[in-house]
Image (cartoon, rainbow, N blue to C red):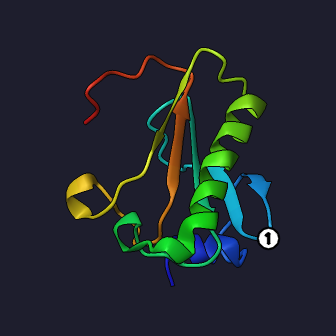
Amino acid sequence: MTIFEKIIARQIPAEILLETDKLIAFRDVNPQAPVHVLIVPKRVLPRLAEATPADREILGELLLAAGELAKKLDLKSGFRVVINSGPDAGESVPHLHVHLLGKRQLGWPPG
């Protein structure tokens, strides 16, 4: 069971900002920006590279949730959405998740 599954099951506390029947969003405990939220599907999908056309709906919901949270968190000046897929990309939990980052200048290229 991943840390995200434990948060979804309420076995580990988290500051939950949004929850639907399909996803949950909470503040990252190791933030890389003043606003750093993780948006996680409740159904385990190990990583974006393993998504199939059957995952189209949840992938769309994750991005729509990022936009909704950006408004809620007043990220008017901009924000970044990141999905890491695989260890070389920095993926540390094998459960697809979206990072929503904001409230600071974000450099380019990232990483």
Say which of 103 and 53 sits in front.
Answer: 53
Total numbered labels placed on residues in the image: 1
Q: Is residue 108 left or right of residue 46?
A: left
Quadrant of res 59 = bottom right
Tell me where residue 90 sits by quadrant.
bottom left
Q: Nearer the viewer, residue 92 or 72?
A: 72
- Residue 54 in the image: state x and y as whole percent: 55, 77
Residue drawn at x 74%, y 30% is: 71
Residue at image location 41% in from the left, 67% down from the top: 93
- Amino acid type of the residue tagged 1 in the rendering: Asp
Residue at x-position 40% and y-position 22%:
106
Residue at horizontal 51 percent and vertical 52 percent from the top: 98
The C terminus appears in which quarter of the rendering? top left
Residue that sits furthest to the bottom in the current view? 1
Left or right: 8 in relation to 19: left
Question: Residue 28: where, in percent of width, then height?
Answer: 55, 49
Q: Up-down: is 96 above or below 77? A: below
In the picture as drawn, the residue positioned furthest to the left comes out as: 88
The image quadrant that residue 105 belongs to is top left
Q: Specify whether 61 is left or right of 28.
A: right
Q: Could you tell me residue 95's position as x and y percent? A: 47, 71
> Where 55 falls versus 105 (above or below)?
below
Instruction: Give percent across and percent down for residue 14.
Output: 68, 58
Q: Which residue is mark 1?
A: 21
Q: Which of these two is toward me, 50 or 25?
A: 50
What is the crowding at mark 1: few (fewer than 14 residues within 10 Å), some, or many (at least 20)?
few
Above or below, comparing residue 6 to residue 91 in the picture: below
Element carrying mark 1? loop
